[in-house]
Image (tube, rainbow, N blue to C red):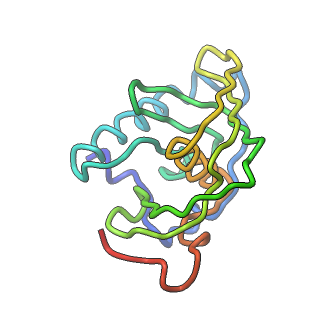
Amino acid sequence: MILNKILPLGDNKLYETSHPVLKEELASLKTTIEDLHDIILAFRAKYNAGRAVASPQIGVMKRIICWNIDEPITMINPELSDLSEEMMEVWDDCMCFPNLLVKVNRHKSCTLRFFNEAWNLQTWHLVGDQSELIQHEYDHLNGILATQRAIDNKSFCWR
C-alpha cells in the first residue's frame, strides 16, 4: 500500500535537511513525484485529510513538495519569504503521525517561489490555511516536524 512509504514519527530521516533538485535530475524523480501525488489521494481517502506532502516524508531527501487542493501541483526547490509578523495559532496534523494534532504558531501570510515540473519559476502569495500548509511542508524540507514547533508541552491531542 502506498501509505506504507510514509516514514513514521521518530524515523531519523525526518530530521535531515533535503538537497536541492538539479534540473537534470527531474526525469529520475518522476516516479517519486507520482508516488507523492498518489499518497495525498490515498491519505485523503483513509483519513479525510491531506492536502500536501514533502519528499522527505517518504525518505527522498530532495526539496520537493506535492500539493493538491484544487489540482495536483509539484513544487521544486521552494523558497519562503516575506513571512508576516502576524501569527496564527493552529492545530497542525501530519501524515507521519496521522492521529496526533499539535498546536503551533504559523505566519499568517508568506510568499512562495518554486519551479514547477516544466522548470518554470512560479511565485505565490499565500494567506491563512494555505500559508500554514506551505510552512508545514517547507519545514519537512529542513528536517523540522510540527512536534518541534509545539507552543508548549500541553499542545498535543489525539484526532
Residue at 47% from the left image edge and 35% from the top image edge:
67
Query: Which residue is more in the foreground, 15 or 83?
Result: 83
- Point out the residue furthest to the left here: 46
Horizontal and vertical percent position of residue 58: 48, 50
Residue in the image at 52% along x and 47% along y: 133
* Residue situated furthest right in the rendering: 82
Q: Would residue 23 be found to the left or right of residue 69 on screen?
A: right
Q: Position of residue 36 (x, y in %)?
A: 43, 38
User: Quick one: 132 or 113, which is closer to the camera?
Assistant: 132
Q: Residue at x 73, y 28 (%)?
A: 22
Q: Is residue 95 left or right of residue 106?
A: left
Q: Is residue 61 above or below residue 64?
A: below
Q: Locate the C terminus and report the quarter of the image it occupies.
A: bottom left
Q: Residue at x 74, y 47 (%)?
A: 83
Please provide percent x and percent y for residue 127. 58, 40
Number of marks: 0
Q: Is residue 37 left or right of residue 77?
A: left
Outermost residue to the front: 86
User: In this rendering, is residue 64 above or below 46?
Assistant: above
